[in-house]
Amino acid sequence: MSLLSKLSRRARVSLATGVAGGLVVVGAVVPSVATAHTTQSPSTTKVSAQADKISRTEMLRRAATWLTANNGSQVPYSQTKTWSDGYRQDCSGYVSMTLGLWKSGPNTVELANNRDLTTPINLGDLKPGDLLIDADGSNTTRHVVIFEGWTDSSRSAYSAFEQRGGHGTDHRVLKYGLDAGSEYKPYRPTNLTDDGGGDPTPPPSVEYPSLKQGSTGADVTTAQYLLRAQGHSTAADGEFGPQTAAQAKAFQSSKKLVADGVIGPKTWPQLIVTASKGAKGDAVRAIQTQLNVYGHKVAVDGSFGAQTHEAVSSFQRDHKLTVDGLVGPQTWVALVGTK
């Protein structure tokens, strides 16, 4: 399951108000920032990071702040600009913010190579808050993402936070580093500490349903809302007819999936949209539809307000997920998944 923050509701709501001036928000604490010490020799410059220890839960809490820090939207990507908290708006600047490193942050190569910052680990040892880094190539190909948790017991994909070009801050399912020969390698931040956050993997008996032409019900309505949220127009009537099948195929083609029109375990992870308090639109309607299946009686109005936030938190509590009010990959599979 997700190891996002175990904050109180009050602190979580305060966090969603924005990130400014070193993450100073109502009811939140300014994260400490590492002091950078530079020692020079005739041929090298070494930066030693003396960052305070930080828990895995706290790191992921910080990662989530950039999803809504831009007036409710994600922080835009830039390799040259810095956000209001002083961190560079690229992937390594984002990771530096989550770890409380110096501003505006080391680059991707240093995150991978500086043993004061990270230590190489095995894929099988990945824990929430660890990093997968591609430090090869140029500044247009190098990248770093924050591992959140495996999507299921097969460990064939994982949910992650990243700051990516053309989009900005994102929280989605990835497979970087899982193929043999991948340039992405796993690393553990040296200032990261375990905090008993629990098992980040959902029970293996839970899986996404397979929907196809002729299927009916709330899961179909949810899939239709999600298709609409992804820009594919279809009625949200709970009837999986020809129009929904056509739009499902179009979506699958856009994601380089097999375009068979069946919304199953491989399509759902690409279709879902991470959402939290303040979000609006069809993805929120999809969440509200599923919450009602579980008896939470929320209005399907597309507005992620206090009522929906409370229902999500209650659902997470009932299903032994981290209670953070954020509907990401782990909460989605529980909302839609079947046993």
Image (spheres, rainbow, N blue to C red):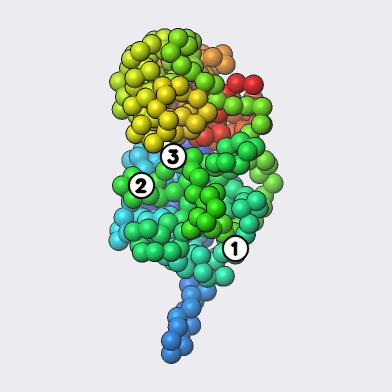
Q: Which amino acid type is shown beneath numbered disc 2?
A: Gly
Q: Quadrant of the C terminus?
A: top right
Q: Percent x, y for residue 86?
A: 38, 59
Residue 69 shows in the view: no
Using the numbered discs, state the Cα–Cα distance from disc 2 to disc 1 in whole angstroms.
26 Å
Q: Quadrant of the N terminus?
A: top right
Q: Which residue is mark 1?
A: 120
- For image coordinates 38% across by 18% down, the residue present is 245
Which of the labelled discs sits on residue 168, or is there none?
2
Residue 108 shows in the view: yes
Nearer-N-terminus badge (2/3): 3
Q: Percent x, y for residue 312?
A: 53, 26
- Local packing at callout 1 (Cα closer than 10 Å; few below 14, some 14-19, many 20+) is some
Using the numbered discs, state the Cα–Cα distance from disc 3 to disc 1 in whole angstroms.
33 Å
Using the numbered discs, state the Cα–Cα distance from disc 2 to disc 3 in whole angstroms.
17 Å
Q: Secondary structure at mark 1?
A: strand
- For image coordinates 38% across by 11% down, the residue present is 241
Nearer-N-terminus badge (3/1): 3
Which of the labelled discs sits on residue 16, or is there none?
3
Which of the labelled discs sits on residue 213, or is there none?
none
Q: Secondary structure at mark 3?
A: loop
- Local packing at callout 2 (Cα closer than 10 Å; few below 14, some 14-19, many 20+) is many
Q: Which amino acid type is shown beneath numbered disc 1?
A: Pro
Q: Are marks 3 and 1 in contact (CB under 8 Å)?
A: no
Judge by depth and name the residue closer to the eye, 16 or 187. 187
Q: Nearer the viewer, mark 2 or mark 3?
A: 2
